[in-house]
Every structure is written in C-alpha cells, then in structure tokens.
Image: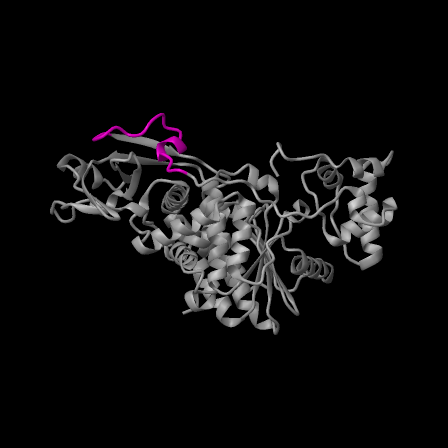
Amino acid sequence: MRDAHRQPNKALRAARGAMTQGALADQVNAEIYRATGEVTVITAKSISDWERGWYTWPTADVRAALCRILGASDPVELGFYKRRVIRSSPEPSSVVLSDLIKSQAVVPTGASRVVELPAGRSFSGAELMLHHCVAEESGRGWLMIEPTEQLSTSLRRTDRWNAIVTSDAEGKYYVSDGRRFAPRRGRRTNRQPVASAHVIDELTTGIIWAVVNTDSALLADDAQLEVSQMRLAHYVEQPASEASMSEVPDLNPVASLWLGSTFCSRHISRHLGRLSETPFFWTREQRGEEASNWLLWNHKLDYLRYTSKRFTGIRRAFCVPEQEVQTSPRYERVLLLLTMALMEAFGITVELTTEPALGDIGGFVLADAAIEANWLGGDGIWRVDARPRPKRHSTYRDIARRLEGESVIACERSAGRLEATADYLGISWSWFRQRCEELAAAGIDGIAQPRSRHLSTRGLDTAIRYIAHIITIEGACLARC
C-alpha cells in the first residue's frame, strides 16, 4: 500500500493499551502455540506494521489469537480488513531507455553513448553501448535499418554489450541487440529489420537489465565457476550440508547465486523419490532481480520441466511483502510477473502471501516428507537438508495450509491468478497482455541474446508466449512438451 493511502490502525493501538508491542507479540506466539501447537515468529515489528497500517489482514491464526488476547469478537473490531491491493496503473507510455539508466537524454542520431545499467542486490551494474541508427524505411510491424561501415566496425567488438536504438516518425524508440548487425567473416551487413514490438518500455527495459547484468557477471567468472564446482563436489552425496562463502571467495555475487541454485536444484531432484504426494514448493524470491533467474538460467528451466513432469497439481508460493513492491521499479516488477507466468505455463499453481514475517523462511519442498534447499538470502552459498527436524517440518505444514486458504491471488483459473498478481504489483494487465502478444509474434531474441553458456531466453520466451495465448492455454499443454 502506498503512503498516500495507508491509514494507521487506531483500533488495534487502542486495544493494546499500556501493553508494549513486544509483550503483545510474545502473547500472540504463545496463544497460537497453545491453540495449534505451531511455532510462529510474530515480533514487535509485526505489531508495529499492523498498527501503522502497512498490513491490514494478518493470517487466520494471528487474527484469532489477537481477538482472544484483546477481548474482541471479530478482527474487524481490531481495525483489520481484507482487501486485494489494486493500484491505479495507467497504460504506460514508451520510455527512453537512457532515462531509466541515468543518462540525461536520448542518444543523438548517428551517435553512440556508453550508459550504465543500474545495480541491484546482487547485480553490480553493467555498461551498455547504445548506438542510434536511423530507420531508413518502415513497414507494418517493422523498421528497416542499415548500420554505417563505421558502426559495423564498432559492433564487432566483443568486450562490451552493444545495442542499436532507432526511432520512428512518432518519436518512439526501439532497441535491438547490436550483435544482430555485426558483419560476419568480412561480409557487410545489409538492411535488417527491427520489430516494432521491441519498443522501449518497462518490458524491454527489464529484459535488457536482467540479461546484460546476469550475462556479464557469469561470463566474468566462467572459468572460476568450473573450478568452484569441482572444489565443492564432495557435498553432492551428503543428505545435509552448508557451504560457506569462504569456500569460493573469488566469485562475484551472481556467480555465487548460480552455484547455490544449481546445487539446490540437483539436491531436490535427487530426493524427490521420497515424496509420494504432490509437493508444495516455497520459494524465496521477492523481487524481479532474484526471480529473473527462472527466466534465464538453463538449469532452472530444466528443473521446472523435470518436477512438473514428475508431479501434477504442484503449488508454488511466493512471499512478496508490500514494501518490496514499493521499493522496486516497475520494470523489475514486470520480471517478477513474468516469472510467475512461467510457473503457470508448467501447470504450477502460483500462490502469494504478503506477510513480511514469512519473508525469512528458506526454500523448501513439502509433501508427506520435507526437503530443505535454500540458496537465496542466507549467509552461505546454500543450506540443504533432505530430512529436516520435525519442528521445522511442522512450520512448513503451517505455511502450506495458510497459503492454501489465504493466497491473495487465489482464483480457479491461471489467468485470474496472474491478473490479480499484476494488480498487486501495480502493472496494467491489459498493457502486459498486449505487449506479450506483440513480442510472442515478433520474437524476443533480437532484444538481448545472452552469450554465457549457462543462460538462454527459453524461459522468458515461454512465459511471454503463455501470456499471449492465456485465453486458450491453461498450463501444461504449452511448457511441458
């Protein structure tokens, strides 16, 4: 909820009286344990967030505990109410990529400019050379451009990312991977098309931001990743292990995450045979930067395909607190929405909680047994356990039950769940669907094609095509084949 709309919960504050927030939090945890036997992690900050109006509908166990402790017959008496966050989101107009990446103005016609792609939590930022090339002619859905000989020479450089930017008579800007126009084996590149679907907006910006940052980082440590995997190979057969960052001190943050994610995916796949029921997956990604690995990393797509073929009816839950939505740019939120679309394309039911108290729970898989595998947000590269302690197993069952009844995007159909997610993320669903339809027809490889052997745009393309055809396609028939 944005600050302009947030209203403090005066009823809850008044009901608390002289009791401190910490004392009330302790009583809530104790009351939930007494009533359900489940261990919860309500803190003074949780009480503060509810009183300040950041979150308006705690989980069912918390609401019931607060009512019993504070003598209320209904959560409404304590100022709580259930709502689905729907933000007004006008159709976004095209934005200039250089505005987003902190350049002062669009690249002048015929000129080139180095611009900085923003950093993130793990992204360190990257340089992109933009070249503005005139569109010599345009047709329906395409602009034709022909780089000059001088530009063609510049595009041959392999030590940096190059992108071609062109514009039409209406002042809209379009972007394309510069390698498409680089001459090969001494042959000069002829006129080539740039699809009008590659107009610069939050969708194309997010793709470029994620691809260039991830690709640059993995290429930088490609050889070191091979060495690191061999160094840590002794962990593979262990049912439980933790690998510390000190074991791979030379890896950059993205490469470390790739290493942890690869190990966790294989750990889960090795132990899925213990599960005889359809599993519930808990994932820790909360922002588009973190979620983009599903769209780009080859092993993540293979993992999705393997698990969705082994089980039908899988549920996968995300925890995305409202603060994460407020502090991330829209192009990053678009990546998160695309990631959830990719899950749905594999027939996986996506669920969403906004409860910040659950944000620190590591990744796990739950069925008749549990598997822990976390590589994101921890102190080390990974932490895995094929047989977690019963206490943790109980916590995971509680989370799975909560999400089953209280997902904020609950809907019978995939399209309904994704539309509700778009509403929550502040993204226009009609705009998003239209842009996916355009890109599905034109293709996305021309925007930014990864160079690293660990990356591809297959997941990204699957998610976009799924949204483009979502009225007629529901899940497995698109992605499982």
Residue 76 position (above or below residue 240): above
Q: Residue 102: within the magenta?
A: yes
| Residue 193, placed above or below residue 410 | above
- Describe residue 148's horizontal placement relative to residue 265 as left or right: left
Residue at 84% x, 51% y: name it. Answer: 31
Residue at the bottom extreme, as displayed: 276
Task: Return the residue nearer the eye: 422 or 352.
Answer: 422
Q: Quadrant of residue 237?
A: bottom right
Instruction: Please identify the residue farthest to the left as the structure is shown.
Output: 187
| Residue 228 position in % (x across, y down) | 45, 52
Q: Quadrant of the N terminus?
A: top right
Q: In the figure, 76 relative to 171: above or below? A: below
Furthest residue toward top? 104
From where the camera sits, is residue 53 visible?
yes
Q: Position of residue 195 (x, y in %)?
A: 27, 47
Specify whether residue 447 is in view. no
Residue placed at 29% from the left, 45% from the top? 196
Q: Nearer the viewer, residue 88 or 331?
A: 88
Image location (x, y in percent) of residue 245 = 53, 46
- Would you say residue 142 sits in the magenta stretch? no
* Corner quadrant of residue 17: top right
User: Viewed as shown, does residue 251 lie left or right of 149?
Assistant: right
The residue positioned 60% from the left and 72% from the top of the image is 274
Q: Residue at x 56, y 41 (%)?
A: 87
The residue closer to the viewer here, 173 or 292, is 173
What is the magenta segment's predominant secondary structure?
loop
Total tally of numbered discs in the picture:
0
User: Where, quadrant-wise, is the C terminus in this rendering?
Assistant: bottom left
| Residue in the foreground of this view, choosing between 302 and 112 | 112
Question: Which residue range is magenta in the image?
Answer: 93-111
Q: Coloured how? A: one colour
